[in-house]
Image: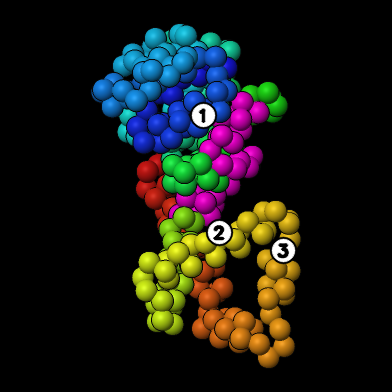
């Protein structure tokens, strides 16, 4: 694969690191206005660092856009005359629909939207992918890129707003739950460092159990709840206080807000 990452900031660097680690490309162009910030990539085999977006587009066929939303229109106008039918465009830009990108560049091009979350920095992103094509090969390319940095799921584009809440905002929701667990552990007698360690690795273990087994969460809950035991006592008390209800309502409120923001932008 001949890949270009247009706008290699924090997200672009994370993607580049995953690709370099997996050695999944023939050539990899990294563009940025200040190329000194990409000095760590200059000695990597097959990696070309440049501040010239057109050069990158001409020499690659897979374009990953990782710029700020306000920069994308300018960049697309800059490169659109260099685009061919062989280019696959992958956008990580929040709020830019496939239709909007298509209108800016004209013609018919394969466009894919990818929405990673901040866990991409440690190779554990949950990245949702949507596209304007049924071309299995093009979708597989996008999945291959982001699978180097976690897990991917191909969804319909109309679900991207919901995916943003579940996966991107979801990182914050899970952090708050881990923080609450840490606070409880401190109250029960652990020091701060021990408490956070217990909370972090227990949450990691819970997710890993579901990933490995494919079980429903209730199946795993049943394994640790016994009649009149402490686990069911705690779970029931949390539910009486609205744990599940509050989380669901919070996510729905976040979804309502993101749709309001989208309408205001339109």
Give the crowd class for mark 3: few <14, some 14-19, many >=20 residues within 10 Å.
Answer: few
- Considering only vertical position in the picture, is 56 above or below 252? above
| Corner quadrant of residue 22 | top right
Q: Is residue 148 magenta?
A: yes
Residue 186: percent from left, percent from top: 39, 77
Q: What residue do we see at 55% from left, 19% from top? A: 25
Residue 22 visible to an observer of this rendering: yes
Using the image, tell me which numbered label, if any, was put on residue 21. Answer: 1
Q: CA distance from mark 1 to mark 3?
A: 33 Å
- Considering only vertical position in the picture, is 243 above or below 155? below
**Residues shaded magenta:** 140-169
Please report whichever mark, 2 or 1, sits nearer to the chain's N-terminal start.
1
Choose between 226 and 109: the one closer to the eye.
226
Give the crowd class for mark 2: few <14, some 14-19, many >=20 residues within 10 Å.
Answer: few
Q: Which residue is mark 2?
A: 204
Please report whichever mark, 1 or 3, sits nearer to the chain's N-terminal start.
1
Q: What residue do we see at 44% from left, 61% from top? A: 175
Q: What residue do we see at 63% from left, 56% from top? A: 208
Identify the secondary structure beneath mark 1.
helix
Q: Which residue is mark 3?
A: 216
Q: Is residue 52 magenta?
A: no
């Amino acid at each position: 694969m001949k890949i270009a990452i247009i706008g290699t900031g924090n997200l672009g660097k994370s993607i580049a690191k995953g690709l370099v680690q997996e050695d999944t490309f023939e050539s990899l162009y990294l563009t940025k206005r200040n190329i000194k910030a990409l000095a760590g990539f200059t000695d990597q085999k097959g990696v070309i660092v440049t501040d010239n977006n057109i050069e990158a587009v001409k020499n690659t066929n897979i374009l990953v856009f990782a710029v700020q939303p306000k920069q994308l229109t300018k960049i697309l106008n800059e490169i659109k005359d260099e685009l061919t039918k062989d280019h696959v465009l992958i956008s990580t830009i929040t709020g830019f629909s496939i239709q909007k990108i298509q209108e800016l560049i004209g013609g018919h091009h394969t466009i894919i939207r990818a929405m990673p979350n901040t866990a991409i920095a440690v190779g554990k992103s949950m990245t949702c992918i949507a596209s304007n094509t049924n071309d299995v090969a093009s979708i597989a390319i996008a999945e291959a890129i982001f699978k180097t940095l976690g897990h991917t799921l191909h969804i319909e584009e109309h679900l991207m707003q919901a995916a943003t809440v579940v996966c991107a905002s979801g990182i914050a929701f899970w952090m708050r739950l881990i923080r609450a667990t840490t606070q409880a552990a401190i109250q029960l007698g652990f020091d701060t460092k021990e408490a956070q360690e217990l909370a972090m690795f227990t949450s990691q273990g819970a997710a890993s159990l579901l990933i490995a087994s494919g079980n429903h969460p209730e199946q795993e809950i049943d394994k640790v709840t016994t009649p009149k035991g402490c686990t069911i006592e705690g779970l029931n008390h949390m539910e009486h206080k609205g744990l599940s209800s509050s989380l669901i309502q919070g996510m729905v409120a976040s979804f309502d807000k993101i749709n309001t923001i989208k309408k205001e932008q339109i």
